[in-house]
Amino acid sequence: MDMTARDTRFGGTAGAASGYLTIDLAALARNYEKLAAALAPARAAAVVKADAYGLGADRVAPRLYAHGCRDFFVAQFVEALRLRPLLAADARIFVLNGLQPGNEAACAREGIVPVVNSLDQWRQWAEAAKALGRRLPAVLQFDTGMSRLGLPPQDRKALAGLLAAEGGIDVLFAMSHLACADEPDSEQNGDQLAEMSRIAKEFPGLDLSFANSGGIFLGPTYHGRLARPGIALYGGAPTARRQNPMEPVVSLDVAVVQTRTVPAGARVGYSGIHVTTGETHLATIAAGYADGLPRSLSGRGAVYCDGVRLPIVGRVSMDSITIDISALPEGRLTLGSRVEVLGPHQALEDVARDAGTISYEILTGLGHRYHRQYR
Ligand SMILES: *Cc1c(COP(=O)(O)O)cnc(C)c1O
């Protein structure tokens, strides 16, 4: 597919948009298969929260199902409700944040599995099972040292009592989440693994789910029975400062909306923070912080054309960014030309680094004005 060709279906550029987001579902599927192979005999789930990290859960989840994935994690119940009709009945959907009080009946009816993070949630789910006169599935989440979600150590005794009392709940597996999985040298990984082993001893017979993307690359002791990759599926690097073994899934091209040549001493953009030191060729492109390119890229980031780095000059605006195109032959970029924001020359991690954030925030922030193309 020629990304630079104009799409004339709408009498102009595709979908009337001026930014073009391409999501490579075949690359996504290869990433899933790569992780599944690395994990065997453990299984690979898919974390599709936040609309599959911004890529579209309605496209991502069915595609992964077709490649053998049967376990899907979302963060919020509302996401599970939206996903449920898109997947066959043998796909399991888990709600990481657990249930808000009052959602139990709908959760049971829709066949969605809550992650139980507290004794209260356990009791409410057990009550729902009793009221419905049937057994209900659940996942137990334990806090192994992140202090975010899950049953804290001091509640484990009471939980064991509730489990023994036969509350009408089938526990499918126990899970916990790693705080530093992308940092293989962090001591916290070993601490959390030791805590997980204690939990496995206290609750014998339960399958374990521990590893996110980074955790998979910490080795088999972290794999449990079911790993929960998110970012690696979408092409993000699972481990910091290491070569990324995953295939890129997302590329982003943005159109030029104006070009100009300014003399030395010209101020560029809001607040005039950038002043040219010599004659400069500039282009303004049609994406800004409202499209998920953070304002912290002001004067730091870059885009690419023909592999040439074109630095961002001045402030990132809401709807546009101005770039210095002096390094290109004159006339190379004109109205309607496209530049690469994410692609072969610039990875997610590069943009994230320049913006002072992480790939996750860049992906989930990618805006809604882009023309989205799946292939
Ligand atoms: C988001 C999340 C994941 C996926 O993490 P990645 O680092 O994107 O692989 C796994 N487990 C839990 C509990 C999460 O919140």
Image (cartoon, rainbow, N blue to C red):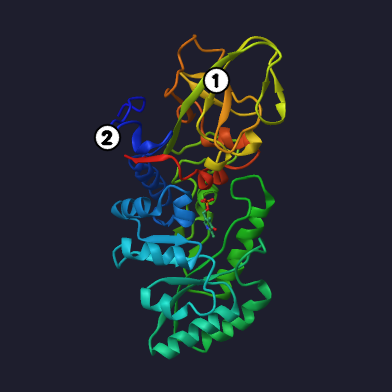
Left or right for 230, reference 30 = right
For the N terminus, give its image quadrant.
Answer: top left
Report x, y in % for residue 85.
32, 65
Left or right for 276, reference 65 = right
Report the residue that reaches farthest toward the front: 11
From where the camera sits, is residue 248 visible? Answer: no
Q: What mark, if any, has residue 105 been given in the picture?
A: none
From where the camera sits, is residue 123 visible? Answer: yes
Left or right for 367, reference 272 = left
For the C terminus, give its image quadrant.
Answer: top left
Q: Is residue 314 above or below residue 281?
A: below
Identity of the amino acid at label 2? Arg
Pick the residue in front: 42 or 252: 252
Identity of the amino acid at label 1? Arg
| Residue at the spot of label 1 | 309
Report x, y in % for residue 330.
49, 9
Give the secondary structure at mark 1: strand
Q: Is residue 155 above or below residue 10?
A: below
Query: Which residue corresponds to the image point at 67% horizontal and 64% vertical from the top-left?
Result: 147
